[in-house]
Image (cartoon, rainbow, N blue to C red):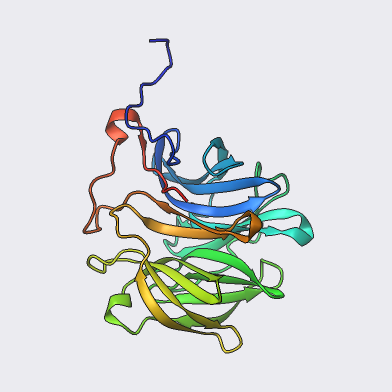
Amino acid sequence: MPKGVKMEKYRPKIHFSAEDYIINDPNGLVYYKGEYHLFHQYNINEQIYWGHAVSKDLVHWKRLPKAIAPDKIGQIWSGSAVVDEENQRMVAFFTYSEHETKRQSQGVAFSYDKGRTWEKYSGNPILTDSREDFRDPKVFRYEEKWVMILSGGDCVLLYESKDLIHWNQISSFKGNQESHTGVWECPDLFHVDGYDILVIGPMHLNEQKCTYLVGNMDYENCRFEPEITGEVDFGFDYYAPQSFEASQGRRLQFAWANAWDWMPWWKGFGTTAQEGWCGSLNIP
């Protein structure tokens, strides 16, 4: 065999995977100037980055250099990205796992070259809280403002902003059914066919996996009223899903095709020992 060529018996051909090390949650999904951007959690020897890949068709992916790196504030955890058309830039939102305080806070970074390079905001973090669980910001546009939904532990928190830097809390939503208690990770809120859909990943809730709640979001009074609930996917490997609006107005969703060892359905992390990489994403 030629020097440097790796035999990768277990590498999936269609599901996206990182070249090496460990990936988990999809982050920053966005369509911009003809490219689908996929960012993801990337654990390289216990240092957490955002990895990055682009595609024209959602099947063939080109891996790019790491996008957002840990810094003096903390590790870079999950988040999202938006296109700020007014300023011709991509804007990424992520959770800091802070080195010194151990708290979770929110940071922002900007790219003016289609995501190839990123500059973190000098005033990071832009949001802090005393909650033990305060993470996974998902930002989207609603009418004339930006809205951020994130996990506040056993609830989701809603913020609004005009400039993507300064945020005011406008609401929170907490489940009132036994099946919807626990920590709500990676919340996502989007509109499809006349309905608003809230997707959450409930932690430590027995066999309950990623859950959807279909209803209506009353933005004027800042309330969400669910009518129908269910599981997004019944397989073992579908966690931390994130959706985005793709070309032609389509709503697409990626998820992490694995699980953590504390989940009842965990079947192992896979091929790390054999081939030096671990984890992949579900097909959108």
Front in this rendered view, residue 204 or 57: 57
Q: Name the quadrant containing residue 54.
A: top right
Vertical placement of 46 versus 274: above or below?
Answer: below
Q: Name the quadrant containing residue 107.
A: bottom right
Estimate the x, y position of residue 119 in percent, counting from the top left.
66, 49
In screen coordinates, is 181 left or right of 130? left
Front in this rendered view, residue 1 or 59: 59
In screen coordinates, is 177 left or right of 174? left
In screen coordinates, is 85 left or right of 202? right
Estimate the x, y position of residue 31 in percent, counting from the top left.
63, 52
Vertical placement of 30 versus 272: above or below?
Answer: below
Q: Can residue 93 be seen in this view?
A: no
Q: In this view, which residue lies farthest toward the bottom?
A: 221
Estimate the x, y position of residue 56 in percent, counting from the top left.
61, 41
At a point 38% along the width and 10% down the height, the residue shown is: 1
Q: Looking at the image, how many numbered discs can be counted on the residues?
A: 0
Q: In this view, which residue lies farthest toward the top?
A: 2
Q: Can residue 163 be seen in this view?
A: yes
